[in-house]
C-alpha cells in the first residue's frame, strides 16, 4: 500500500495532461492510478478534464466576445487629454509632497543624532517609506502618455 501512495505524486503530472484519471484495483487488492483504463481490473473514474483549448498560433483573441453597446458612453479625445492632464497634475503634486516628506524625515533622522537604534528605527522607516513613494510616483509619471 505504501508503494501505491508513494507513486501517486509521480502519476499526477501524467494525469494533468490526460483527460481522465482512473483508480483501478485488481483481484488481489493492488491499487493503480492511471490515465488508461485497463482490462481485468475494476476501475473507477477519479477525475475527468476537458481537453485544453487549441493553440491560437500567435493570434490575439479578445477576452470577451461581447460587443460594446451602441449607447455605451464614449470619451472624446479632448476630454481624455484633459483627464490625463489632471492626472499628471495630481501625480506631480503628490510627488512634490513626498519629496518634502523625504526631506523632513531625513532632517528628523539627522536631528536624532546618536540615539539608540530602537529610537532611530521609526525615523529610518519613515525615510524609506517616503523614498519608495517617490520612486513609485516617478514610475507612474513615466508611464503616462
Image (spheres, grey):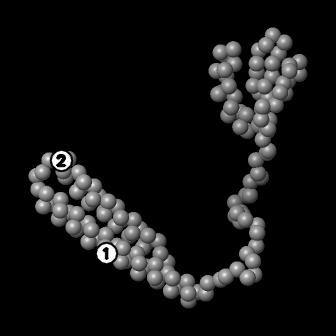
* Disc 2 secondary structure class: helix
Residue shown at 77%/52% (left/top)?
Answer: 54
Rendered residue at 31%/63% (across/down): 130
Q: Would you place residue 48 above or below residue 111 in this image?
A: above
Q: Quadrant of the N terminus?
A: top right
Position above or below: 50 against 145: above
Instruction: Please give left or right for residue 95 compared with residue 57 in the image.
Output: left
Instruction: Give the image quarter of residue 122.
Output: bottom left
- In front of the other: label 2 or label 1? 2
Name the residue at the bottom extreme. 78
Mark 1, residue position: 96
| Any part of residue 73 in sight | yes
Q: Relative to the observer, which residue lies in front, 108 or 37?
A: 108
Position of 36 with respect to 93 (left or right) is right
Sequence-first disc among 2 and 1: 1
Mark 2 lies on residue: 117
Amino acid at each position: 500500500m505504501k508503494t501505491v501512495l508513494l507513486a501517486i505524486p509521480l502519476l499526477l503530472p501524467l494525469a494533468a495532461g490526460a483527460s481522465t484519471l482512473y483508480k483501478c484495483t485488481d483481484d488481489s487488492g493492488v491499487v493503480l492510478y492511471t490515465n488508461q483504463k485497463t482490462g481485468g481490473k475494476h476501475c473507477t473514474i477519479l477525475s475527468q478534464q476537458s481537453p485544453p483549448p487549441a493553440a491560437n498560433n500567435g493570434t490575439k483573441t479578445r477576452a470577451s466576445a461581447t460587443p460594446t453597446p451602441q449607447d455605451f458612453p464614449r470619451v472624446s479625445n479632448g476630454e481624455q487629454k484633459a483627464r490625463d492632464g489632471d492626472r499628471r497634475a495630481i501625480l506631480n503634486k503628490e510627488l512634490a509632497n513626498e519629496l518634502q516628506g523625504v526631506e523632513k524625515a531625513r532632517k528628523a533622522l539627522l536631528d536624532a543624532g546618536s540615539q539608540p537604534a530602537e529610537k532611530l528605527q521609526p525615523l529610518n522607516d519613515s525615510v524609506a517609506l517616503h523614498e519608495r513613494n517617490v520612486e513609485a510616483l516617478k514610475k507612474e509619471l513615466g508611464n503616462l502618455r
